Image: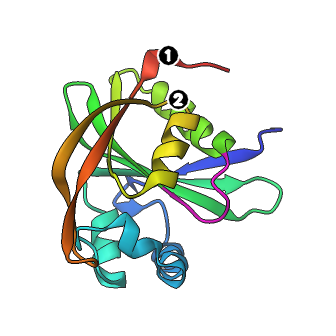
Amino acid sequence: MNERYQLWPAAFVNGSFSVPDEILRFLWREMAQTGKNESLFYNGGVRDEGEWLSWMKNPDNYPVLVIETLSKKIVCIAWLNHIVDGAALVHFCMLGLPRAEIGKTVLRYWSGIGALSVLVGFTPETFTAAIKYAKRIGFVESGYIPLMCNMVYEGRRVGAIITVYLTNQLEG
């Protein structure tokens, strides 16, 4: 395999979670060191390592880890949740530089899931780098909801930019 990135879907297989807790704890610590845990879970929904482990294993979440093939480093964790009638909410957390190729690799994977047609992002309007990244990998800005995002760590609410990716729009 000559792929630059490999995907490691996280799921229960024969009663065991496919990603060991040790790796999940490592990911939490990486996010916490860089403050990404508070921006990723801006609403305060996941606040510590124990909550992270429980949250990752929640059957409503469909995480996938992205591993750089040469270095064997985890460079991203992404997940879908709230899947309803072919649509899902999408989330990305980069552990390093936000390379477009990483996001496009994940989108190709998700686009191969025949039951999914629409991927939706609700991003706080203040997260301009995340919004730019979403557009760079193929999402289209399609709306705005005032005061939708409860920024618990900042003590305020901000609007959400809605971005949409149609899985049948896959490009090379």
Residue that label 2 marks: 138
Q: Can residue 44 be found in the magenta stretch?
A: no
Over which residues does the magenta segment extend?
93-99
Image check: 43 left or right of 111? Answer: left
Residue 17, percent from left and from top: 40, 62
Disc 2 residue type (three-letter): Gly
Q: Name the image quarter holding residue 156.
A: bottom left
Image check: 52 left or right of 127? Answer: left
Q: Name the image quarter holding residue 170.
A: top right
Image check: 5 left or right of 138? Answer: right
Q: Please identify the residue farthest to the top as the structure is shown.
A: 168
Disc 1 residue type (three-letter): Gln
Q: Can residue 95 be found in the magenta stretch?
A: yes
Image check: 52 left or right of 134? Answer: left
> Residue 147 got which mark?
none
Residue that label 1 marks: 169
Number of numbered discs present?
2
Q: Are marks 2 and 1 in contact (CB under 8 Å)?
A: yes
Q: How is the image coloured?
A: rainbow
Disc 1 packing (10 Å; few <14; some 14–19; many ≥20): few
Residue 91, percent from left and from top: 40, 50
Residue lying at 32% horizontally and 84% vertically, measured from the top left? 48
Residue lying at 46% horizontally and 31% vertically, measured from the top left? 139
Rendered view: 36 above or below 129: below
Q: Quarter of the image containing the N terminus?
A: top right
